[in-house]
């Protein structure tokens, strides 16, 4: 088998694995909180936010900047966790596959 044929087959397998992992990441979630649990964010490992929950006791109309900061912190934390999981899963597929221009 020629090396080019091997590369094409390897690329096809990697593409199939990549699509499967991307599908799995779209349903896998992580949860992050801030403010001692006053704000909870659930993010999917495909980089989207699934939900945001805010404890009603954390809502003080005169202090919305604090609530905004808590939401921002929880969102960034959840997305960071999701990116780490995504990178780890994608790295499993691309390890050992070294073509110029590929991850």
Image (cartoon, rainbow, N blue to C red):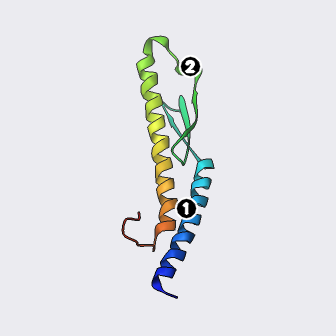
Q: Quadrant of residue 99?
A: bottom left
Image check: 83 left or right of 57? Answer: left
What x and y, as percent, mark residue 84? 46, 53
Q: On screen, 46 above or below 56?
A: below
Residue at x-position 52% and y-position 21%: 58
Q: Residues within 10 Å of mark 1 (few under 14, many from 20)?
A: some
Which secondary structure, mark 2?
helix
Residue occupying the point 36% across, 69% down: 100
Dot label at residue 99: none
Q: Mark 2 and mark 1: span between their CA atoms? A: 43 Å
Q: Residue at x 46, y 70 (%)?
A: 95
Q: Position of residue 85 (x, y in %)?
A: 51, 54
Report which quarter residue 66 is drawn in.
Answer: top left
Look at discs 2 and 1 and give the one toward the viewer. 1
Number of the label disc, if any, that sits on residue 18: 1
**Percent from the top left, x then y, of residue 103?**
41, 63
Q: Is residue 97 above or below residue 68?
A: below
Of residue 85 and residue 26, the one placed in the foreground of this image is: 26
Mark 2, Cα crowd under 10 Å, few <14 / some 14-19 / many 20+, is: few
Say the numbered circle drawn on residue 57.
2
Tell me what residue is drawn at x 58 percent, y 20 percent: 56
Residue 89 place in picture, x, y as percent: 52, 60
**Which residue ends up furthest to the top in the rendered image?**
62
Q: Residue furthest bottom?
A: 1
Q: Is residue 18 above or below residue 5?
A: above
For mark 1, give the secondary structure: helix
């Amino acid at each position: 088998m020629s090396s080019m044929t091997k590369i094409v087959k390897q690329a096809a397998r990697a593409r199939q694995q990549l699509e499967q992992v991307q599908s799995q990441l779209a349903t896998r979630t992580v949860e992050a909180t801030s403010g001692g649990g006053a704000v909870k964010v659930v993010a999917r490992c495909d980089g989207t936010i699934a939900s945001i929950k805010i404890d009603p006791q954390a809502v003080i109309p005169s202090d919305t900047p604090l609530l905004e900061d808590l939401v921002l912190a929880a969102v960034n934390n959840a997305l960071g966790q999701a990116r780490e999981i995504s990178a780890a899963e994608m790295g499993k597929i691309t390890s050992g596959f070294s073509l110029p221009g590929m991850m």
